Image: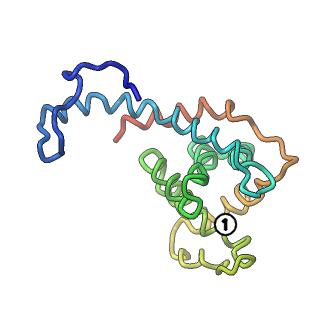
Amino acid sequence: MNEPHESRAERAEFRSFQESTKDDWSLIMRHIGATQDRVADNALHLLRTLSSDHGGFPVTRLEHSLQTATRAEEDGRDEEYVMCALLHDIGDTLAPFNHPYIASTMVKPIVSEANHFMVAQHGIFQGYYFWHHIGLDRNARDAFRGSPYYEYTEEFCAKYDSPAFDPDYVSAPIEHFEPMLRRLFADRSNSH
C-alpha cells in the first residue's frame, strides 16, 4: 500500500520508543490534532458499517443506534446524551461481547462520568430484558446497585435502548446527527 508522500523530516526517526527523543515527541504532538480531527469521521464511518449487519435482530445495527438516539433526542436529552445513545453499540460488529467497552473508551474523554458509565455498562443492564432467555442471570446489573449511575443507566436501557428494535419506527437519519457528533468531538477534543 502506498502512503502519501512525506519527507523523512516530517516523521520521527526512532525505531522503538526507547530510542525516541523529545524532538520526536514534539513532532508527533504537532500531528495529534489532525488525528483527533478525524475522530468524528471515523465514528461516522463505523456507524455506517452497521447498516449492513442485522445480526438476526429485527432492524440493522445502524437502525437500532439511530432509533436509540432519536428516542433520546425526542425526549429532550442533551446532545452529549444523544451522542452516547447514537454511539453506544458502535463496537457491536468489532467485538459483540465487548462492544460496550469499545464505545465507552471512545467517548470517555468527552462525556460526563454518568454518561461514560451508562455506555460502559449498558450491555449488562440491557441483559435484564433477555439474558434469562439465553441462560444468563438477568439480574447481573444488580452488582452495580451501589453506583450513583444505576438508575440513570437502567432508565437509558428501558426508555431508549430496549425499545429501539421497531421496524416501523421512523428514526432520524445519520445525517441529522452528524453536525452534533462533529461539534461534540471538536468542542471537547482540545480539553485533554
Instruction: Choose between 119 and 73: the one closer to the eye.
Output: 119
Q: Which residue is drawn at 72% across and 63% down?
A: 158
Residue under circle 1?
126
Instruction: Give x and y (percent) for residue 60.
Output: 74, 48
- Quadrant where the C terminus lies? top left
Image check: 33 left or right of 79?
left
Instruction: Choose between 187 and 40: the one closer to the eye.
Output: 40
Image check: 104 left or right of 142?
left
Image check: 60 left or right of 124?
right
**Quick one: which residue is furthest to the right in this view?**
168
Instruction: Choose between 109 and 8: the one closer to the eye.
Output: 8
Asked if 61 appears above or below 189 in the picture, the reply is below
Q: Which residue is drawn at 54% across and 78% down?
A: 143
Instruction: Give x and y (percent) for residue 165.
Output: 78, 54
Give, as a three-letter code, the residue at label 1: Gln
Instruction: Choose between 34 and 13: the one closer to the eye.
Output: 13
Colour treatment of the image: rainbow
Asked if 115 appears above or below 2 in the picture, the reply is below
- Quadrant where the N terminus lies? top left
Instruction: Give x and y (percent) for residue 161.
Output: 70, 57
Asked if 158 appears above or below 46 in the picture, the reply is below
**Quick one: which residue is furthest to the front in this view?**
1
Instruction: Give x and y (percent) for residue 11.
Output: 23, 27
Quadrant of res 55: bottom right
